[in-house]
Amino acid sequence: MKLKEKTGGVTAAKGFWAAGIEAAIKYQNRLDMAMIYSEIPCVAAGVFTSNLVKAAPVLWDKEVVENGEAVHAVIVNSGIANACTGEQGLDYCKRTATAAADALSVKENAVLIASTGVIGMQLPIDRIVAGVEQLVKSKEETLAAGSLAARAIMTTDTVSKEIAVEFELEGATITLGGMCKGSGMIHPNMCTMLGFLTTDLAISKEMLQQALSENVVDTFNMISVDGDTSTNDTLVIMANGSAGNEMITEKNDAYLLFLQALNYVNTWLAKKMAGDGEGATALFETKVIHADKKEQARVLAKSVICSSLTKAAIFGHDANWGRILCAMGYSGAQFNPDCMELFFESRAGKILIYQNGKAVDYSEEEATRVLSENEVTVVVDLKQGNEEAAAWGCDLTYDYVKINADYRS
């Protein structure tokens, strides 16, 4: 499949509008409310936090995605998570959806809600409702509107995250766009992320859900910043069918092409979140290759990028490979440490560190140079089979503690 990146995010696909505005939910003088809208009814799919403590918008969205007929809009606020807010929090979701439904002339259960920010605070619902009205008035189909929406959902993120791709399917040009936020409290299933995908593909709700659920296993569920799984994790995809392709209703070649595009977009967004972890100076990737089983590779890769000691070593540009072996050893996955190789890799080069049970004669200076880039990869060659997996995290810095020590203020 020839996949082409294009400018834009959630408004790149045909028929999608967006807006981002200042509503003063918690922040002052910055965008903090966003909307995505399709006049054409969309089928929607979603995956949500595995945390037993689920925010009110997560409960709302699960009901809409699982039992609703069509979705037209998503309303998002940043600053306050609307989590651990009781019945009032659920009522505020309903009031937000009602305000959007009235302004857009759609059904209340056709509106998804998402929130991110401080847990335990009640939303200023009057500002939320006023913000909805402003979003509806401000919505545009432009790429710039999509970029405003991507900025409006940020909390401690340092950069907005959006991407769009297109590919040909049965003579039709299909576009898939997305945006996400996430910087801290990142440890799926899912992570403290909000992610929104839009496509003009014609696909059944069942196949859309299957594609999303299948793909997150190797994308968003393979990232971690700090080991904390949030109350608000939400990833939804809306498909309005505007591209005019034949409806995908089974796992055929068209479905597999879409899955490739979905994997590309979700991998890109996941890596951007990991690299933008709170206080991070480097994206830290672990690739496990030549594993006997896929799940073995996943578990080992994830264990390494989740190790606080290894993350601290990456921050210090220290080739402390023993921490990596240690993290692999307690992961629960089986492997033979006496029959494997370990490499460090970056734009500065690739260096073999460990082989067949012991360190090789490598240069510490060269290893430090490789580890001093802003994207660093650990390659683990198990020499057992043909399976592989990758996981993404970031280094652990002084600023992570500083950011989270005064987050509520």
Image (cartoon, rainbow, N blue to C red):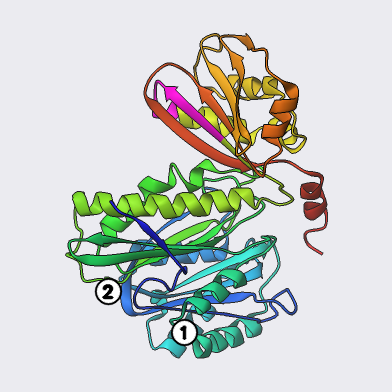
Disc 1 element: loop
Q: Give the range drawn in magenta.
A: 286-296
The amino acid sitting under disc 1 is: Glu
Q: Is 70 on the left or on the right of 138, as rendered?
A: left
At a point 60% along the width and 39% down the height, the residue shown is 347
Q: Is residue 389 visible?
A: yes
Among the two numbered marks 2 and 1 on one chain, the one whose residue lies closer to the N terminus = 1
Residue wearing tag 2: 242
- Where's residue 217, x and y in %? 43, 43
Q: What residue type is labelled 2?
A: Ser
Disc 2 crowd rating (10 Å Cα; few below 14, some 14-19, many 20+) is: some
In the rendered view, would you say 361 is above or below 36? above
Q: Is residue 322 above or below residue 89?
A: above
Measuring from the top left, give residue 141's x and y in whole percent.
Answer: 43, 81
Q: In which quarter of the image is the C terminus?
A: bottom right
Residue 154: x and y in percent read 63, 66
The residue indicated by pointer 1 is 140
